[in-house]
Image (cartoon, helix red, strand yellow):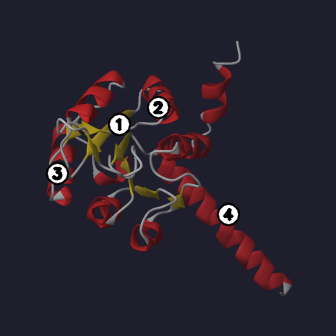
Amino acid sequence: MSDTQRITRESLERKVAVDLRDRAMSIELLLLDVDGVLTDGRVTYTAAGDEIKRFHVRDGSGLKIWRDLGLRAAVISGRSSPAVERRMAELDVSPVLQGRSDKAAAFYELLASTGLTADKVCAMGDDLPDLPIMLRSGLAVAVADACPEVRAAAVFTTREPGGRGAVREAIEWLLTLRGQWTAAADQFRI
């Protein structure tokens, strides 16, 4: 590689890094899918027909840190579950839009209700129904085990799969880009 090519490549890498940091700084809302992002994507029913969902505790603590910084989080899910309502209420995540097969319409409804523009949203998904939101958002994040099309649409793909701390990892990534992660973590070193 010539010096000119190296300088051009380094300049481009710096420009991309600055653009990504600027985009992360503008994010005000983290928008999450549930099945496959906040959970591992499996659906389990009890003998009585009740649905069981497993949420990762580090995703919850990450969302608490996110919220404590004055940032918002919301959910759009194609399925409906009382367990999701309960867990999101515990974490002060709102709005929670469930049973929304048309996620693009739900996304526009969310923007209208929050007064935000799409560039202020970071959307996190795992499967094809999440693409309309991810492609319209300011930043898109995929979980490690997302389908190839979702990973291709993402600017960041977590190392962890959905339901195994991927949301926490995405929050750490965003807050690191914003220069806020170290201070957020330091509050626990008392």
Discs 4/3, front:
3
Instruction: Determine the residue positioned at 50% across, 62% down.
Output: 155
Q: Secondary structure at mark 1?
A: strand
User: Mark 4 sits on what residue?
Assistant: 14
Q: How packed is label 4: few (under 14 Cα within 10 Å), some, or many (20 or more)? A: few
Residue 173 lies, in percent from the top left, at: 58, 46
Discs 1/4, front:
1
Task: State how far apart marks 4 and 3 are (Cα).
Answer: 36 Å
Work out whether 178 lies above or below 89.
Answer: below
Task: State how far apart marks 2 and 4 are (Cα).
Answer: 27 Å
Disc with the residue nearer the chain's start (4 vs 3): 4
User: Mark 1 sits on what residue?
Assistant: 73
Quadrant hosting residue 39 = top left
Q: How packed is label 1: few (under 14 Cα within 10 Å), some, or many (20 or more)? A: many
Quadrant holding the N terminus: bottom right
User: Mark 2 sits on what residue?
Assistant: 66
Q: Are marks 1 and 4 in contact (CB under 8 Å)?
A: no
Disc with the residue nearer the chain's start (1 vs 4): 4
Q: Are marks 3 and 1 in contact (CB under 8 Å)?
A: no
Residue 41 lies, in percent from the top left, at: 36, 52
What is the number of the mark on residue 142? none
Residue 171 left/right relative to 117: right
Task: State how far apart marks 1 and 4 are (Cα).
Answer: 29 Å
Residue occupying the far bottom of the picture: 2
Instruction: Determine the residue positioned at 17% across, 39% down.
Output: 49
Task: State how far apart marks 3 and 1 are (Cα).
Answer: 15 Å
Discs 2/4, front:
2
Q: Secondary structure at mark 4?
A: helix
Q: Secondary structure at mark 3?
A: helix
Identify which amino acid the numbered label 4 is placed on.
Arg
Work out whether 61 lies above or below 76.
Answer: above
Disc with the residue nearer the chain's start (2 vs 4): 4
